[in-house]
Structures are given as C-alpha cells and as structure tokens.
Amino acid sequence: MRRIITIIIGSLLLVACKSPEARRPISSKSGSFIDASVARNIKLNEKEQSFIKKIMKENPNEKYLASENGFWYYYNTKQADSLISPDFGDIVNFIYDIKTLNGQVIYTKDDIKTQNYVMDKQELFSGLREGLKLMKAGETVTFMFPSQKAYGYYGDENRIGTNVPLICEVSINSIIDNQQEQ
C-alpha cells in the first residue's frame, strides 16, 4: 500500500512540475484569401478604369483631368476670378447628383438637396470629399469616380450597390472661410 501511495505522489509531483504546453492552432490560415481579394480588386479597378477611359474617348469635347486621388473630372463651369478653394473646416454649400457610368440616374439633385459640408469634419464619400477640394465657389464639375473612391464594397445600403463606379455633377454655391467665422 505504501508503494502505491509513493507512486501516486511521485506521479503528481511529476505532473505538477511540468510547465503548461502552448495550444496549437487547429488550422493554419495562409494569405490565400487576402491574395485572392487583392487580385479581384486589381481586376475590378482595371475594368472600371478601362470603362472610364472609353467614356472619355467617346466625349472628346470635354477636357478631362486626372486627379492625384484616382478619379477623373472636367469643368462644366470654371471660375477664373474666384480664388477661394475650400480648406479644412470651411463650410461648403453645394448640390450634386449621382449616376452610373452608363448615365442611369441614381439620385437627382432634388433627391439629395443642397448640402452644407464642413470640410474634412463630416462624413462624405472619399472621392467627393477630395473633389470638393479642387473646386471654387460658382464652379460646376463632373467627376467620374471608380467604386473604391465612391461607396466601394458596401454601397450606400439603399440605391447604390456593391462596387459601383459613379458620375457626379457637383456645383458649389458658396464657401464660407472658417477664419471669417472666428
């Protein structure tokens, strides 16, 4: 009996002194999902850009400009005498519409209504936010945004679906300088 107790105590001491072993992952994930996602997005971007370039080629009367931010635009109305472009915190009063690249209207100017936007302090899709910075009061510009500069993968959860490139005609009514407000 003494021998059994000694064996049990010895076994407990051996088990108790053993350091805990790290758990191993059940499965190991490779970067294959991310790699596939990157490849899919590159193809999508190339497809959208080629469609935008086709539209530009079909409209040679418009003087298209490429922005540094990955979208294209042209001026419907350009103001040479207005020097004020919006800066951080400026209040921009503007109106715009949204169409697909095929010209199908998604939201009219009446649907969206006139907007007051505090530059870079409120939510606005990235392409439009960057586009407003290129404009001056009294100008109207037509922008062509690839989907990643518009509403991207999620859409607007209403009328704009997943990965939809957009055309927006934007008119700035006024810009109130935030320095004047202080």
Image (spheres, rainbow, N blue to C red):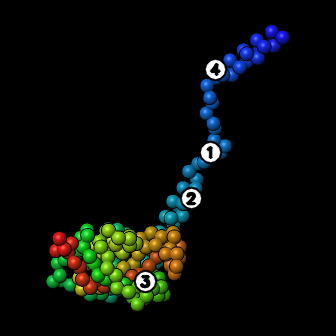
Q: Secondary structure at mark 1?
A: loop
The image position of residue 77, as x and y in percent, is 26, 87
55 sits to left or right of 17? left
- Residue plotted at (29% across, 71% down): 119
Badge 2 density bin: few <14, some 14–19, many ≥20, Cα 10 Å: few
Amino acid at dot 1? Ser
Which of these two is toward me, 149 or 118?
Answer: 118
Find residue 182 and report its image quarter: bottom left
Q: Secondary structure at mark 3?
A: strand
Q: Earlier in the sequence, mark 3 or mark 1?
A: 1
Q: Look at the numbered discs 1 and 2 and tell me whether their residues touch, using CB distance below 8 Å.
A: no
Find residue 23 and report its image quarter: top right
Q: Earlier in the sequence, mark 1 or mark 2?
A: 1
| Disc nearest the viewer among 4 and 3 | 4
78 sits to left or right of 21? left
Q: Earlier in the sequence, mark 4 or mark 3?
A: 4
Q: Which mark is residue 98?
A: 3
Mark 4 and mark 3: Cα distance apart in space: 69 Å
Q: Secondary structure at mark 4?
A: helix
| Disc nearest the viewer among 4 and 1 | 4
Q: Which residue is mark 4?
A: 17
Q: Earlier in the sequence, mark 3 or mark 2?
A: 2
